[in-house]
Amino acid sequence: MNFIMILYYIITGIAIFFMAWNFIKAKDKDLNKLMLYAIAMFPLLLRLFRLK
Amino acid sequence: MKIRKWIILGILIFSLIAAGIPLYNQRHYKETIVASPELTDTFMLSKYFPELEGTMGDTRVYEFKGEKEGGKSLVIAGTHASEIVAPLAGYLWIENLKVEKGTVYVIPRFNLSGSLGTQPGGGFPLFFDIDTGWGEKKFRMGDRGLQALDQWPDPDVYVHYPEGQMFSYIDARNTNRTWPGRPDGFLAEKITHAAMQMIKKENIDVVFDLHSAEVMFPVTNCIVVPEVSKRYAIGASLFVKGREGFECHVESSPPNFRGLSHREISDYSDALVFLIEAPSLHLDQISGPKTEELMLEGKDPFIKVAAKEGLLYVPIDEDRGWTIERRVGQQSSVMLEVIDQFNRKNEDRAIEIKAPKHAEIVEKGLGAFFQNPEKVPDDRIFKQ
């Protein structure tokens, strides 16, 4: 795994962190936002766990 | 967190597990190969470029050496793992090849990484099975390029080395755009570099690169060759038509389209190169659901409509379909015929081999040529 690839995994991890933070901070009644954060996190989590 | 968040989080985790397990299983599934008793050696491609060792770019090479000295041929299959005909033709030869004179090397999964996942959003099954007399033999369905897990990130523009031609970013992961490769490039470039080292070091005479293409794409059902290979390809094309009754026309390798095997192997080595394309309906965007049945039986109602409109570059016989037997059989027969043509003009480097031909494969079914791993010694079984 080259250096640039490692950096991209770090960027992915940071993006997931902020999305998860926003998910936690979003209002419970704002269903649209909650679902959007969850859906947006999905491909990033797949990559971070090296599944796809 | 409130209950609604927990529910959404639960759905996310459930979806991740539900999607992740099949993807993980496919990436880690090993195909079983039962080599012919004629197999003389196997080694990894990294033998010719040690830096490849231990990476997802390394792949197994199967060697079949005849008792008599002769020329050498290399069969590269699985460059594009979504084109399932190619690895199946490679496996067919590994399981059935007999070499009397010369040496044949077979790489069934040239782009091993590409075979470990399907095209994102393509809707392809993760696996497909071939019926045999002893059960079903399972294979991985793959993607065109290396998995982004193994070569990431993609560049904005892929600049070919050494010609400098610019390609789409996605072609940086395409091992049929990275020839002749380079030792310090992308993983795809390292793979083709290793293969070029092999071709030069082993003094390979004839290289085959097996592919399949859409029926609505002009370069299909053909042999793509540079100028130096043309007379052999034309001879082979005429003979398969006359002897075996199927079409496989000849296409010229464009001199200004860089990175392809049929261009760069010819320009950067002394080998004669032949890229063989078989028609595959599942690759056409307009074909229906990308099912295992479509991939193996080669019948589709939408393609049938396109055929009626005159939009295809190969004839479609709806009753028969472009079955996997026809396509693998054609590739095997064309390779045998090219070698025959080569032998006629290069007696001192002749390669004498036997492998199943088109008519025999169509008649018996492809599965009849795959051996039961439970009935052969362990030293002939390989997993990859």
Image (cartoon, rainbow, N blue to C red):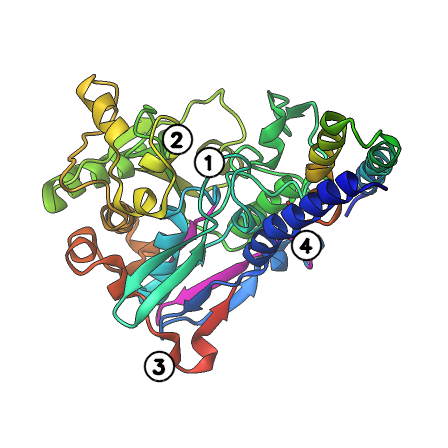
Tell me the tag on residue B375. Answer: 3
Please say whether residue B304 is one of the residues in the magenta stretch.
no
Amino acid under disc 4: Thr
Res. B125 in view: yes
Mark 4, other Cα within 10 Å: few <14 / some 14–19 / many ≥20: few
Mainly helix, strand or loop, the magenta region? Answer: strand
Q: Closer to the N terminus: mark 1 or mark 2?
A: 2
Q: Which residue is mark 2?
A: B226
Q: Are marks 3 and 1 on the same chain?
A: yes
Q: Closer to the N terminus: mark 4 or mark 1?
A: 4
Q: CA distance from mark 4 to mark 1?
A: 27 Å
Compared with B307, A45 (above or below) is below
Amino acid under disc 1: Ser
Q: How many marks?
A: 4
State the residue at coordinates (76%, 31%). A34
Q: Quadrant of the N terminus of chain B?
A: top right
Dot 2 and dot 4 residues touching (CB under 8 Å): no
Q: CA distance from mark 3 to mark 4?
A: 32 Å
Q: Which residues are magenta?
A: B54-78
Element assignment for label 3: helix
Q: Position of residue B188 (x, y in %)?
A: 62, 41
Residue B239: image quadrant is top left
State the residue at coordinates (20%, 51%). B358
Q: Nearer the viewer, residue B118 or B34?
A: B118
Mark 3, other Cα within 10 Å: few <14 / some 14–19 / many ≥20: few
Res. B98 in view: no
Amino acid under disc 3: Lys
- Which chain contains the residue that carries disc 4? B
Element assignment for label 2: loop
Compared with B71, B281 (above or below) is above
Amino acid under disc 2: Pro
Dot 1 and dot 2 residues touching (CB under 8 Å): yes
